[in-house]
Amino acid sequence: MLSRAKLAELRARGHAWLEGHPRMRRALDATGCLRGDRQSIARGIAAGLFVALTPLFGVQTLLLVPVCVLLRANFPAAFAASWLSNPFTIGPMLLAFNALGRVVSGMLSQPLTAAATTGGDALLQTQLTIIGSLLIAVPVSLLGYGAALWVQGRFADRAAGG
């Protein structure tokens, strides 16, 4: 668990970064992406998890801005959650996405699985990876949303003395 001092330091760093990027700050302020209420933070965590679990490594942060604007989600929470995928985890995640996509496509049609196991069709491999990633990203982001609301509720109860 992060100490209050560490959280204050991280908050200060975030504010310093935003001060150096005034257009980004104005855009995030105008769209409500810097709000700190329970719902927007939970939406931010869900958005970050969803984007992190897609095979779009390298452009995830760029995708977070429009997703946060669309969902009116907290951008800092989304950014933090998106680091679930990083240079150390992206390889195993892509392999798992592809394997899940192959399993699901095998249940739907046998020829698709046979073509995918030969590895000759890059487009098919990409499609299988996308299918697998969506099958993981959607439920994980929904669970992240619910967990964020639950955790924030527990802290609110403790702060209120309950």
Image (cartoon, rainbow, N blue to C red):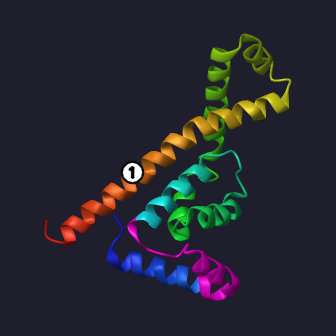
Q: Give, as a three-letter code, the residue at label 1.
A: Gly
Relative to 121, say whether 143 is above or below: below
The N terminus - image quarter: bottom left
Q: Nearer the viewer, residue 105 or 99?
A: 105
- Span of residues in magenta: 17-38
Q: Residue at x 36, y 58 (%)?
A: 149
Percent of width and height locating residue 5:
36, 80
Give the labeled residue for mark 1: 146
**Residue 151 placement, left or right of 58:** left
Q: Residue 114 lies in what quarter of the image?
A: top right
Q: Which residue is drawn at 56% across and 43% down?
A: 137
Q: Is the magenta stretch mostly helix, strand or loop?
A: helix
Q: Which residue is drawn at 67% across and 33% down?
A: 131
Q: Residue at x 47, y 79 (%)?
A: 11
Q: Residue 124 lies in what quarter of the image?
A: top right
Dot 1 alpha-carbon crowd within 10 angstroms: few under 14, some 14 to 19, many 20 or more:
some
Percent of width and height locating residue 74:
51, 68
Percent of width and height locating residue 117:
75, 18
Residue 83 in sight from this viewpoint:
no
On whether residue 22 falls in the magenta region, the answer is: yes
Instruction: Give SS at disc 1.
Output: helix
Q: Residue 150 lies in what quarter of the image?
A: bottom left
Percent of width and height locating residue 3:
33, 73
Residue 66 in sight from this viewpoint:
yes
Relative to 103, say whether 133 is above or below: below
On whether residue 159 falls in the magenta region, the answer is: no
Q: Nearer the viewer, residue 53 or 66?
A: 66
